[in-house]
Image (spheres, rainbow, N blue to C red):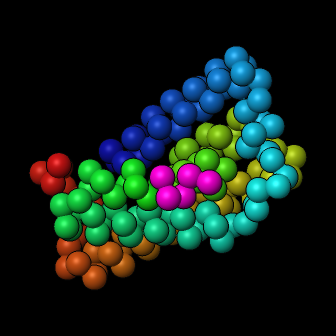
């Protein structure tokens, strides 16, 4: 129940923040709907898998403080267009920008794929490291 509430809070916060920024700057939709950026479900799925995998592996090796920021830095050229490979972030951005090339059905399919990709990445990392897939709060 807590992850669902956290995801909902993240979605609402990001959605409100994106809406405010879009109204102030006025270029949010132009940035996120850029036609030159490759728009592929495989990129979103791969990114969410890698994010879930690296998060669990980093916790297994006590490197959680560095792995996520370094991963996002490495993928910074494409990550903003895919909500930094986070399903709630991607959904919030997509609902605020409403790009004409991305139907709501496609957006929801990508969000679902990202959730599954993150879960599978976490499960594979947990299996490989011999660790549960959800890091405990005592790891920080």
Magenta run includes residue 108? no
Where is residue 10 shown, x and y percent of the image? 47, 37
Position of 15 relative to 114 (above/below) = above
Residue for point 73% across, 33% down: 28
> In terms of depth relative to the viewer, which is nearer, 129 or 74?
74
Q: Main secondary structure of the magenta part?
A: loop
- Residue 139 lies in what quarter of the image? bottom left
The quadrant holding residue 89 is top right
100 vs 78: above or below: above
Left or right: 65, with 111 as reference point? left
Q: Start and end of the magenta stretch?
A: 73-77
Residue 80 shows in this picture: yes
Q: Nearer the viewer, residue 6 or 30?
A: 30
Horizontal side of residue 13 vs 60, given as left or right: right
Task: Compare residues 8 and 65 and report the one nearer the observer.
Answer: 65
Picture residue at 57% right of the left edge, 26% below the top: 17
Residue at 59% x, 26% y is 16
Toward the top, the furthest residue is: 24
Outermost residue toward the bottom? Answer: 128
- Seen in the picture, residue 100 relative to 131 is either above or below; the reply is above
Q: Is residue 24 left or right of residue 3?
A: right
- Picture layout, residue 140 above or below residue 39: above
Instruction: Give the mark count.
Output: 0
């Amino acid at each position: 129940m807590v992850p669902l509430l956290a995801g909902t809070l993240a979605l609402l916060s990001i959605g409100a923040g994106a809406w405010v920024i879009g109204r102030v700057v006025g270029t949010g939709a132009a940035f996120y709907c850029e036609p030159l950026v490759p728009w592929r479900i495989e990129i979103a799925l791969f990114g969410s898998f890698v994010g879930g995998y690296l998060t669990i592996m980093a916790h297994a090796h006590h490197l959680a403080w560095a792995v996520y920021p370094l991963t996002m830095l490495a993928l910074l050229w494409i990550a903003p267009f895919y909500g930094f490979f986070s399903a709630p972030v991607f959904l919030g951005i997509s609902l605020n920008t409403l790009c004409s090339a991305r139907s709501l059905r496609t957006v929801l399919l990508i969000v679902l794929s990202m959730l599954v990709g993150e879960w599978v990445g976490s499960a594979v990392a947990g299996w490989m490291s011999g660790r549960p897939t959800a890091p405990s709060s005592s790891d920080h």
